[in-house]
Amino acid sequence: MRMFFDSTLRAVAAAALVLLFSDAAICASQAVAPPLPPPPAYRQVTDEIGRTIRVPRSIHRIVSLAPNLTETIYALGLQDRLVGDTDYCDFPPDARQKAKVGGAVNPSLEAIASLHPDLVLVTKNLNRLETVNALDSLGIPSYATDPHTVEAIIASTERLADLLGAPESGTALGKDMERRIAAIKDRVAALPLRSVLFVVWTEPLISIGKDTFIADALQHAGAVSVIDSSQNWPHINLEEVVRLQPEFLVFAESHPDNAAHTTDTLADLPGWRILDAVKHHRFAVISDAVNRPAPRIASAIEELARQLHPEAFAETPQSDKDNASPLPPGSTQPSTSPLHLARDFSVAQECACAQ
Amino acid sequence: MRPVTLQRLLLQCGILALILFAVVVVALKLGAVPVSLYGLGRDLISVLLRQTSQLSSDYGMIVIEIRLPRILLAIVVGASLSVAGTSFQALLRNPLADPYVLGVSMGAALGAVLALIAEPHLALPVWLAALFTPLGAFLGAAATIAAVYLLGRREGQIDSATLLLAGIISSSFLSAIIMFLLTTLTGRDFRGMAFWLMGDLSSPLQSSLRWVLGIGFLVATGAIYTTAADLNLLLAGEKEAMHLGVDVRRVRLVVYIAASILTGLAVSVSGAIGYVGLLVPHVMRLLFGSDHRTLLPTAAFGGAIAVVIADTLARTVVAPSELPVGAMTALVGAPLFIYLLRRRMA
């Protein structure tokens, strides 16, 4: 019995040894046979929150952890390099088809790693530092954006284009955004600023603080937020709003029906019903693009300016006729989206083709 | 136990009513818009006389339209939570029982959230739609207290520690479900997470809901008060009370249902505000004794005073921003509770 075991053990050990050596031999032959590839070209860049990071010189696989960054990549015409995005990345509709890595706040690190990205894009006001640190420890480079104004969104877009090796697309897109925002400014600059309350949420009442890019976007549309808070999403006392009596309430909605329901409810609600804006039904409902620091912010500013200052857009020249119809909020289908909304992408695609 | 005379009861309630009145006047004065007491008095009288056209200014309108309703809401919510807490403490013979600790508030909040989710799909008549959220909150509260009561029993008797553990576990389980629902099904029409988990009084109520809240409060509090003498006997133990001729089953049923209605109503309009139902009855017991015939009405006044003060702080401390009122009650309540606990042990 004992002999049998011994012989069996010996046989197993021998087999294991053979396997081990053959494995080593294969490894050795692999290591020697092909010449070592040249080390990948990396470069040092500083991102918008001041981190110095090392990124490959050419980036082919991008994971975006924020809807605004996903939109920016599409606007730059670089969507083929986007290999993954979040559950909330819904614009353009094609972004829904990308591999999903979870939410922006709690993405799955395993899902990100399995996509083997060259670079992960994050944005400070949405993603968490823990995610960035975890990616660092996995050796996955990440680049953070942090725009607080409309100008910063344009600059951030151009920097991102530069980083991804498409500076021409970035410059063209940035120029287009600047031109459109300047065109709105020309129309509304001479008009008095409209005082508005930007309503993020009604129950409880949440508005925006003065340091947000939304507050800056309001300024570009010829409006100013009545709320002067240093918090980004302040919970505001309704009495204070009644005291300040904003001329307009501004809602950002993905579905116009939601906004209609909200504004109807407010007309009967104690407190809200004594607001002049509610009494006179002065509501501006714009697409929720205004909530995302991405190239579509220019469209959102146009929409808002048209609703707050209709007189500035009354006499529209023939060439601009397509822009005259008010934008249906939340139209995400490319076929139904108005010309100036689609233009973001056509410009970018032209550039991509030109490359 | 000191004998209760009508005179003593009226005296105690009168003192508390005066304090409540003073607190309300101060609360009416404080806020985003400064008001004079004279102008305020004149405005209130003209509103009572239904001569709203004679209001002194827009600012008077703010006080009448926003601040006063909010203070009245704080009074009803505070009184409801405090009376519910007193009843649970008597019925479960546990001084640590209150709607928040027992998980009943979270049960009510979950019921209200589910009702809010279901309502748009049901095409209800208007009168039922207004009642639907409080109804969901009541059912959630009633189901939770039944579950906690059953989980907290050991060999046919309520076990104090087991009961509290059952309440705490239920509370965290239910708040996890609320968080799950609000993060996955979130939409603009829902009140924020802080509202349901911390309590918040900043959202004005629909007029129909005000009536439901007021009538529900009076009926449920009245029902509990009819059992006040029996609750005193129950303090000695369920068996002992039964021997003394108390219909324990009936008392238990009345108080459970009425306390669930109070909790459900309060939570459906203000979210889960902690510590009021726990602390106010304790303070009132220290001040006026543990006879439920005086404890129930004084606890109602005390709860109202506490929540009006807490909400006034919540809306003025970081004005023009707001804090959830539940954060204020917890900030003051938790240290006060520890103080009372240690004092009792000493």
Image: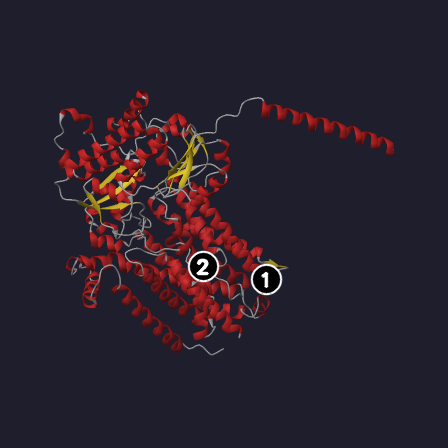
Q: Quadrant of residue A42?
A: top left
Amino acid beneath label 2: Ala
Where is mark 2, residue-wise?
A: B258
Provide the chain ID for the residue under circle 1. B
Between B255 and A345, the residue placed more toward the observer is A345
Which secondary structure lies at badge 1? loop
Separation of residues labelled 1 and 2 (CA atoms):
23 Å
Please say if B11 is above or below B206. Answer: below
- In the rendered view, would you say A10 is above or below B36? above
Q: Residue at x 28, y 49 (%)?
A: A209
Write down the chain letter for disc 2.
Answer: B
Quarter assignment of residue A106:
top left
Q: Is residue B57 left or right of residue B190?
A: left
- The residue wearing badge 1 is B159
Q: Give x and y (percent) for residue B291.
A: 47, 73
Q: Are marks 1 and 2 on the same chain?
A: yes
Mark 2, secondary structure of its residue: helix
- What colour scheme has been applied to the protein in the rendered image? secondary structure
Ranked by sequence position, the earlier of labels 1 and 2 is 1
Residue B54 in picture, x, y percent from top left: 15, 60
| Residue at 46% over, 56% down | B260
- From this viewpoint, is residue A103 visible? yes
Name the front one of labels 1 and 2: 1
Residue A53, x across and y down, in percent: 41, 39
Tell me the crowding category of disc 2: few under 14, some 14 to 19, or many 20 or more residues within 10 angstroms, Cα based.
many
Q: Is residue B121 above or below residue A346?
A: below
Give whichever of A142, A127 is nearer the camera.
A142
